[in-house]
């Protein structure tokens, strides 16, 4: 059956009245762009001045959008989601590290997550960002095809080794790995590395997924090329489709540096390519697995309807829907209720290290007209249904 995204009883069954009130307070606060901007500036300042603001962040944004500070804490949230038929994507959300020591230290943390996931029935995926294992400047240099010095070449080989170690462990433990897409000016090495991992580990099952940002006007063609390359080389493509999270940054950089923006001219063009990309994948499920990473109800509904119309079982391993923890529960829980495969991105890590992630969530939730308005109206609807104030 098709899911009903308006059903708030199913969407919020796991939230107590108190938690709903907390969520309402959070989304109302974020709905003011001015307040969010000031809040974000003050938070960054307070953290750099080492002021004791951790408690405030932890009990507001962090608790709502993250699974915990450690994997063990996140595991509790994963178990709760599992009760509702929702899988978890463990996302070690530490960002902004820039030393070989930190990159090396991240590898065993990911292996631990993979081994934990393998021991749990609710955690089919982990996710990773290549910038968690490589200097941003090195990625930029590889992207621009400049020749590397000997030291840089050695550093790049170490990056490859780190990613390979993780993907190999994932393959051995039968856990899927989602490689996030990032800024367009480092995406080439991210794609190449991920393609190499898919070629190595996706021979019979999709273990590794690359991410395609459909707000880029060249990505629909790139998705088609990636599928053809996988077919020619005899491996399965893992296609995680998103719209893209760095639009303002992309446009601003292109304007300042005077090159054509890689971003679509408008939202309709992004939406059109997103839906075309999902259709392209749905028509080729014998050669790829589709991961629908979006909070857009219309896109999710189109995929679910295509599956229903074409008798693709809701719980096929070749299609996963995904939303971020703390957002769009009406989509996740109602899809899971109809037995579609759903997994929530669940970041975890020390509060100060997941701050960039929380800032992105605060930023994307500032518009009353957009996602926040939707979240607020659903929360209000459910509170009214429960008759709580
Ligand atoms: C499970 C999951 C995983 C994710 N992983 C990644 C990742 O690896 N990399 C990444 O970059 N993002 C990632 N994101 C974030 C994602 O790219 C979007 O920023 C976010 O989900 C909002 O898009 P939407 O499809 O949910 O919703 P919608 O509200 O329908 O779309 C909003 C998006 O549309 C695009 N858009 C908005 N206005 C315009 C405009 N004027 N012109 C052109 N395009 C426009 C932007 O991409 C914007 O974020 C992920 C999201 C989810 C749910």
Image (spheres, helix red, strand yellow):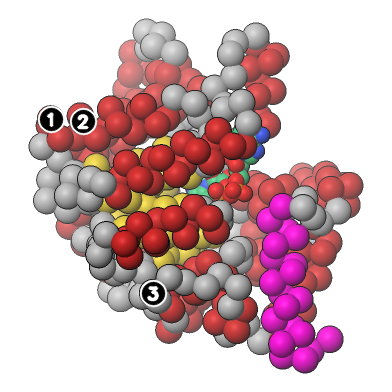
Q: Quadrant of the C terminus?
A: bottom right
User: In the rendered image of this protein, does residue 387 appear above or below residue 252?
Assistant: below
Q: Which mark is residue 228?
A: 2
Q: Which mark is residue 232?
A: 1
The boundaries of the magenta stretch are 370-389
User: In the rendered image of this protein, does residue 66 appear above or below residue 131?
Assistant: below
Q: Nearer the viewer, residue 48 or 219?
A: 219
How many other residues sit within 10 Å of disc 2, few (<14), some (14-19) or many (≥20)? Answer: some
C-alpha distance separating marks 2 and 3: 33 Å
Give the quarter of the image for residue 117.
Answer: bottom left
Q: Nearer the viewer, residue 313 or 25?
A: 313
Give the quarter of the image for residue 198.
Answer: top left
140 sits to left or right of 145: right
Q: Quadrant of the N terminus?
A: bottom left
Expressed as whole percent of the image width and height from the top left, the position of residue 7 reads 58, 78
Mark 3 highlights which residue? 1
C-alpha distance separating marks 1 and 3: 36 Å
Residue at x-position 44% and y-position 13%: 144
Residue lying furthest bottom: 387
């Amino acid at each position: 059956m098709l899911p009903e995204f308006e059903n708030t009883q199913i969407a919020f069954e796991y939230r107590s009245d108190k938690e709903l009130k907390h969520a309402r307070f959070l989304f109302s606060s974020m709905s003011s762009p001015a307040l969010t901007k000031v809040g974000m500036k003050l938070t960054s300042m307070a953290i750099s001045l080492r002021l004791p603001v951790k408690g405030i962040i932890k009990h507001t944004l962090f608790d709502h959008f993250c699974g915990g500070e450690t994997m063990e804490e996140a595991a509790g949230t994963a178990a709760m989601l599992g009760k509702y038929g929702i899988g978890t994507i463990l996302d070690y959300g530490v960002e902004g590290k820039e030393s070989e020591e930190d990159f090396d230290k991240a590898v065993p943390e990911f292996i631990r997550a993979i081994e934990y996931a393998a021991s749990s029935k609710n955690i089919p995926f982990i996710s990773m960002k290549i910038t968690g294992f490589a200097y941003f400047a090195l990625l930029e240099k590889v992207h621009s095809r400049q020749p590397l010095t000997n030291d840089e070449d050695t550093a790049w080989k170490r990056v490859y080794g780190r990613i390979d170690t993780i993907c190999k462990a994932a393959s051995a433990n039968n856990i899927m790995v989602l490689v996030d897409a990032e800024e367009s000016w480092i995406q080439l090495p991210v794609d190449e590395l991920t393609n190499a991992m898919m070629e190595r580990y996706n021979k019979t099952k999709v273990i590794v997924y690359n991410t395609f940002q459909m707000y880029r006007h060249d990505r629909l063609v790139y998705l088609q090329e990636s599928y053809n390359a996988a077919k020619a080389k005899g491996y399965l493509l893992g296609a995680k489709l998103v719209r893209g999270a760095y639009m303002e940054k992309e446009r601003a950089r292109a304007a300042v540096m005077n090159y054509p923006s890689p971003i679509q001219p408008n939202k309709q063009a992004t939406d059109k390519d997103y839906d075309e990309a999902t259709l392209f994948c749905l028509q080729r499920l014998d050669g790829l697995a589709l991961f629908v990473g979006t909070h857009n109800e219309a896109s999710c509904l189109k995929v679910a309807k295509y599956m229903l119309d074409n008798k693709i079982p809701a719980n096929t391993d070749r299609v996963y829907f995904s939303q971020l923890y703390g957002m769009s529960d009406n989509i996740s829980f109602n899809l899971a209720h109809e037995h579609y495969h759903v997994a929530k991105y669940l970041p975890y890590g020390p509060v100060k290290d997941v701050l960039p992630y929380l800032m992105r969530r605060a930023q994307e939730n500032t518009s009353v007209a957009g996602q926040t308005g939707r979240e607020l109206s659903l929360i209000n609807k459910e509170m009214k249904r429960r008759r709580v104030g």
